[in-house]
Image (tube, rainbow, N blue to C red):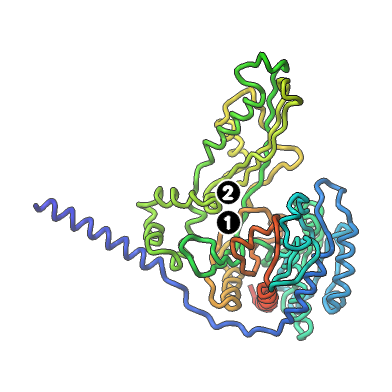
């Protein structure tokens, strides 16, 4: 009886301990006073985005394949649309198509800050045109939205930045630190001719940035199960990128006398093995994100998150059921291309496939290739880094215990009604990774609200941004430019 009582006491103490941890981890931050909102002409801003969408600045794969004319048309449009920005900021054209604007600060001892957006967009798959509610490059304004390719990726942000700067200049804005606005022209095809060249120019000028803001996370309206309140996701790192080329060959011949496996069978087996053996999960990057949002989560999930020392495997199993959350937990792979065979009754002589991987911080290209080779373990399959697209490591993690991040967090809550703000590892690639040699405080955040349904429009069908979100974005950019422009960090 004594032993049973002791066990009950220990269990009770353990439960109390875990409940205390849950309570302590579920506290909302103190609310902040909302920022005074400058007047923004929603109709005019919407029309400006509509005009920019109508300029079909579509990315094209391959060095030297970019048509410069659409970007030159954007340059002319900027001059005509934003006269103060064009006349008062120094304008530098980079590699014919990209733009860099500079507003000098009054105190040269303060390192500059930079705000980035790209002018290029992905093409529209012609087979999807019947599913579009509007012509993709019409810039149609209706139902409270601006529609068209680039509305959220990322002409909306480009217009938001230019509108914000124009408005600040109209108010006589003069920052203490220098502010750059950068607009690359080839982010959608890796950014090697745009942002890379902008960084080369800045380095040649001896510029080292105090902070920069680029596209990335956004304010999600329904991004977590059981969470009904919006929350902002600020990228402090981004996954690496790697495309592997896999090749195999076999003797050609008549399909009526096949071997046990054809070249296609060999490749199919290799891809299936990768699908059945994904890279290991790592909770350390997603856990801080979940903890910072824990006060929004259902009590049961909050209890598990607060006590991962006991429930780690339960939490991981739960999170991996979501495609998005699973991608935040591990290096992912996706077989994206396969080619082989010339006729239905001829054994293929060779088969090639491409597998695209997105590397979690901590997983190097070398380690990932070793893992893939170990999983496939087939000498008939030759695995190499794809020459066309190659790869790069995950970006460094920007610190969150700095004035640059804390002020970004503050402004986000001031503008968006005390929305929860959380750092995370961004899943896709951005131009900002090219700036790592001249900046340690790199943040990836698109300051507007999106539902999961609206997010599907990015690179997809019916891309659009609400006019309210567009207006809020201008307000946010004006505020963060003022704060970063005068903060002494």
At 53% from the left edge and 40% from the top edge, which residue is drawn? 278
Q: Which quarter shows the C terminus?
A: bottom right
Local secondary structure at mark 1:
strand
**Which x, y percent locates residue 218?**
61, 65
| Circle number at residue 21 | none
At 59% from the left edge and 64% from the top edge, which residue is drawn? 451
At 76% from the left edge and 76% from the top edge, which residue is drawn? 45
Mark nearer the N terminus (2 vs 1)? 2
The residue singled out by tag 1 in the image is: 425
In this rendering, the count of numbered labels is 2
Local secondary structure at mark 2:
loop
**Which x, y percent locates residue 401?**
54, 66
Q: Is residue 249 above or below residue 76?
A: above
Crowding near the residue tagged with mark 1, few <14, some 14–19, many ≥20 C-alpha atoms within 10 Å: many
The residue singled out by tag 2 in the image is: 360
Q: Is residue 117 something one can see in this rendering?
A: no
Q: Quadrant of residue 383?
A: top right
Q: Foreground residue, 133 or 17? A: 133
**Which x, y percent locates residue 266?**
62, 25
| Proximity of marks 2 and 1: CB atoms separated by less than 8 Å | yes
Question: As drawn, is 476 to the left or to the right of 117?
Answer: left
């Amino acid at each position: 009886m004594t032993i049973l009582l002791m066990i009950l006491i220990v269990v009770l103490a353990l439960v109390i301990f875990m409940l205390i941890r849950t309570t302590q981890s579920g506290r909302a931050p103190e609310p902040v006073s909302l920022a005074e909102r400058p007047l923004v002409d929603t109709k005019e801003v919407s029309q400006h985005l509509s005009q920019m969408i109508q300029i079909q600045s579509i990315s094209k794969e391959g060095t030297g394949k970019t048509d410069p004319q659409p970007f030159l048309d954007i340059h002319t449009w900027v001059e005509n649309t934003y006269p103060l920005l064009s006349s008062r900021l120094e304008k530098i054209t980079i590699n014919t198509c990209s733009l860099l604007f500079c507003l000098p600060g009054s105190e040269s001892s303060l390192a500059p800050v930079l705000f980035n957006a790209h002018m290029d967009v992905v093409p529209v798959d012609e087979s999807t045109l019947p599913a579009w509610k509007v012509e993709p490059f019409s810039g149609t304004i209706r139902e409270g939205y601006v529609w068209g390719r680039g509305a959220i990726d990322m002409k909306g942000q480009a217009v938001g930045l230019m509108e914000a700067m124009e408005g600040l200049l109209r108010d006589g804005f003069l920052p203490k630190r220098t502010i750059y606005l950068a607009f690359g022209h080839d982010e959608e095809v890796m950014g090697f001719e745009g942002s890379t060249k902008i960084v080369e120019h800045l380095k040649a000028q001896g510029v080292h940035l105090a902070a920069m803001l680029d596209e990335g996370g956004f304010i999600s309206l329904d991004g977590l199960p059981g969470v009904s309140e919006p929350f902002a996701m600020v990228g402090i790192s981004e996954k690496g990128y790697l495309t592997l080329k896999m090749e195999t060959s076999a003797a050609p011949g008549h399909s009526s006398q096949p071997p046990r496996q054809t070249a296609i069978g060999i490749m199919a087996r290799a891809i299936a093995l990768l699908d059945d053996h994904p890279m290991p999960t790592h909770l350390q990057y997603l856990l801080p994100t979940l903890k910072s949002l824990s006060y929004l989560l259902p009590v049961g999930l909050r209890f598990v998150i607060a006590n991962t020392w006991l429930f780690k495997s339960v939490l991981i199993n739960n999170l991996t059921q979501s495609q998005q959350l699973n991608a935040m937990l591990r290096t992912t792979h996706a077989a994206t291309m396969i080619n082989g065979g010339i006729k239905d009754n001829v054994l293929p002589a060779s088969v090639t496939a491409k597998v695209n991987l997105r590397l979690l911080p901590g997983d190097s290209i070398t380690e990932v290739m070793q893992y893939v080779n170990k999983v496939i373990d087939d000498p008939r399959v030759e695995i190499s880094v794809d020459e066309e697209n190659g790869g790069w490591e995950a970006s460094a993690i920007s610190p969150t215990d700095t004035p640059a991040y804390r002020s970004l967090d503050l402004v986000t809550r001031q503008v968006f009604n005390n929305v929860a703000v959380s750092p995370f590892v961004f899943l896709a690639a951005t131009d900002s990774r090219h700036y790592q040699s001249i900046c340690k405080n790199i943040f990836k955040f698109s300051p507007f609200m999106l539902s999961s349904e609206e997010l599907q429009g990015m690179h997809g069908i019916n891309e659009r941004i609400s006019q309210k979100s567009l207006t809020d974005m201008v307000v946010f950019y004006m505020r963060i430019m003022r704060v970063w422009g005068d903060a002494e960090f």
